[in-house]
Amino acid sequence: MRKVYTIGDCVLDLFFENDTPVEAKPGGSFLNSAVSLSRLGINVSLISELGIDRVGNQIKNFLVENGVDIRHISYFSDTNSNLALAFLDENKNADYAFYKTRKGLPNAIVFPNDVQKDDIVLFGSFLAVKKEFRSALLTFLLECKERGALIIYDPNFRSQHLPMLPEVLPFIKENMAVAHVVKASNEDFELICKMENSDQAYNWLNEFSDAILIYTANKHGLSIYNQQKYFFEVPPINPISTVGAGDTVNAAIAFVFVRDGIKTSDLAALSQEQINKLAAVTTTFSQDVCMIYDNFLPIATADKYRLR
C-alpha cells in the first residue's frame, strides 16, 4: 500500500468554553490528520518532534495506540512539549493561543529517505514556514517531488501570525508552488492575500502555481478547481467544535487518493465522478468531526470507510 507522510508540530490541545477548560487532547494539525488516516486503514507516518516529558509521552502513547508510525518522530530534552489553547466561541469556532517552547531553537526533526513514487506527503501550518526549519523542509519536498510523490499543502494560517506575514509570505507561495494540491480555507486566503472568495483565491494562486485548489468555506460550501471550478453545497449542522474540521479534510483528500488509486500523474485529468467522490468524503468526514471534541475522525465513521 502507498504510504502517507504528514509533517507538523505535536501539541496538547486544551479546549475552553466560557473561559472554562472542558477537554484536553493530543493535537497539532498533521497529528490529527495522521490519526484519522490510521483509523481509516492507511499506512501513515508522522514526521515531527516531541519533548521528553509527561506531555510528550502522553502524545507518543496516543499515536501508538492509534496505529500511527512514530519512527520519524525526533525527541528533544532542552525544553518542554508544546501546548495549544483553543477558546471556543458561540459558533464553536476556536481562537487559539499557542505556547511553542522551541522558538528560535534548531529543529530536532530528521526526514526519512525512503519516500516512494506516488506516496503522499501532507504538510503545512506554521512549521512549514518556520525559518529554522525552512531549508531542510524545502530540500525534502523537492526530493519527494523529484521521486514522483504526491504533495498536499495546507497553509492553515492563523491571525496570531499576521505580524509575521511579510516575512513568511514568500515561503507560503513557495510551498504552494511545490504542491500538487493546495487545500486552504476562506480564512486562510483572507489573511494571506486578502482574497474574499474562491475565484479570487484561485486566480491569485494560479499566478505562480499549477496546483489543484480545494477551497473550504465552512457552511458556505466547498470549491474544487482543477482547470475548471466545481462547487458543492454542504448540509447545515450544529457543531460542538470546529477545531479538527480542516485537518480531517486533509485526511479525507489523502484517503480518497489512496482508496481510489489516484496517482500523481492522474491529477490533471480527474473526472467529474472522482471529484464528486472527493467532495462527498471530505464533507462527511469534516462534519462528523465537528460533532465531537476530538480533532480526529470518529472511530464509528472510520470503521464505515476503513480499507480492509
Image (cartoon, rainbow, N blue to C red):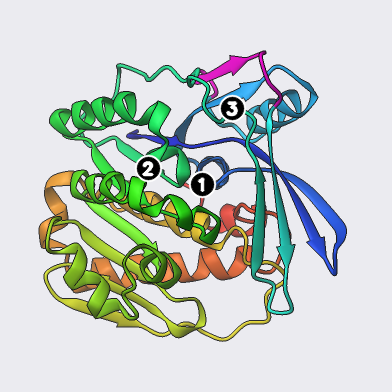
Point out residue 27 in the picture as x, y percentages from the top left corner.
Answer: 64, 44
Q: Marks 2 and 3, Cα distance to the nearest angstrom?
A: 22 Å
Q: Are marks 1 and 2 in contact (CB under 8 Å)?
A: yes
N-terminal of the pair, mark 1 or mark 3, is 1
| Disc 2 packing (10 Å; few <14; some 14–19; many ≥20) | many
Residue 151 can be seen, yes or no? yes
Q: Which residue is located at x 33 percent, y 38 percent?
A: 121
Mark 3, residue position? 102
| Magenta stretch secondary structure, dominant | loop
Point out residue 165 in the picture as x, y percentages from the top left corner.
Answer: 39, 53
N-terminal of the pair, mark 1 or mark 2, is 1
Point out residue 96 in the picture as x, y percentages from the top left corner.
Answer: 65, 57
Mark 2, residue position? 122
Q: Is residue 284 rendered magenta in the image?
A: no
The picture quadrant where one finds residue 128 is top left
Residue kind at label 2, given as amino acid type: Leu
Secondary structure beneath disc 2? Answer: strand
